[in-house]
Amino acid sequence: AVVSTQSTWEAVVSTQSTWEAVVSTQSTWEAVVSTQSTWKAVVSTQSTWEFQSVTKDGLDLGETKAEKQFWEDKKEDFEDFISWYKEVLGSQVNKVQVSSRLSETALTIVTSKFGVSANMERLSKGQAFGSGGQTATKIVEINPLNPVIKALAAKTKDTPNDPQLKDLAALLYDSALVQSGFAIDGDNGAAFGERVGRLVRDGLEVEQGAKSEELPEFPEDEEDEDEDEDEDDEDEDEEDEEEEEEEDEDEAEAAGEDGDEGEEEDKEEL
């Protein structure tokens, strides 16, 4: 969502993949927005328009001087937490900064103003041989008014090296990653699964090193009497077949010898 403290404008946000948001900085405007996957026009009563993407860095909400000073003070208050969070996320993100665009959400991920969007990154990776495709420059924006961010920042002051705090911070990032249209895949997917597993073990008070129960030793199957009898019958059948073959051979040989003797007798008579 886009939140403005001004009463002179509103934001129109679509969940369609073909467009993201339309924001006007004019004092008054009207818009016609289609809920279809494609749309043709946004009509305004103003002669000039200024458009901004709410998923890009550098969104101008038309803040007053007092509002700008308020957010500057928040940046100073969360300076240590921002440094800690950037260290936890490492090279996954370009920077971490305080956001003025969020209301209830703890954090969001935007991309550089003139860089690749989350949707373009996903499409690029989906192409053939897309493993080396375009990568968006990710910027984490935190909501300093959100109770989760405030609690996390307070705990990092006391125990900045607590592994559970780092897992929680990374899990917040993973959640925002999906909500912002990015994908968790490859090595990030494996790390995500391990992180969730650790948090589940902590929540259920299961030791991190606890292993699954080993299978018991099963005895080998004993040979059944029926199987032994079948095998004996097969052996007997084979022996009977061999004996029959030998008898047939003997009869054939005997018949051959008788034939030879008859031929010799005939020759002698002649």
Image: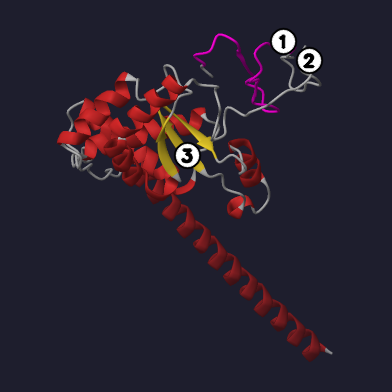
Of 101 and 93, the residue lying toward us: 101
Residue, far front: 65
Disc tally is: 3
Q: Disc 3 residue type?
A: Ile
Residue 220 lies left or right of residue 104; in this view the side is left
* Helix, strand or loop status at disc 3: strand
User: Can you tell which quarter of the image residue 82 is in?
Assistant: top left
Q: Which mark is residue 139?
A: 3
* Helix, strand or loop status at disc 2: loop
Q: Disc 1 residue type?
A: Glu
Residue 238 lies left or right of residue 166; in this view the side is right
Was residue 106 drawn as part of the magenta stretch in this picture? no
| Residue at x 71% of width, y 28% of height | 18
Name the spot of residue 195 as percent of width and height, x first.
Answer: 32, 38
Part of the protein shown in magenta: 4-32
Of 18 and 156, the residue lying toward us: 156
Nearer the observer, disc 1 or disc 3? Answer: 1
User: Can you tell which quarter of the image residue 188 is in?
Assistant: top left
Q: Can you identify the residue that label 1 sits on?
A: 30
**How dense is the environment of label 1, judged by Cα within 10 Å: few (below 14), some, or many (20 and up)?**
few
Name the spot of residue 177 as percent of width and height, x first.
Answer: 47, 34
Q: In which quarter of the image is the C terminus?
A: bottom right
What is the C-alpha distance between the residues marked 1 and 3? 31 Å
What is the C-alpha distance between the residues marked 2 and 1? 7 Å
Q: Residue 43 carries which label?
A: 2
Q: Disc 2 residue type?
A: Val
**How dense is the environment of label 2, judged by Cα within 10 Å: few (below 14), some, or many (20 and up)?**
few
Name the spot of residue 161 as percent of width and height, x first.
Answer: 19, 42
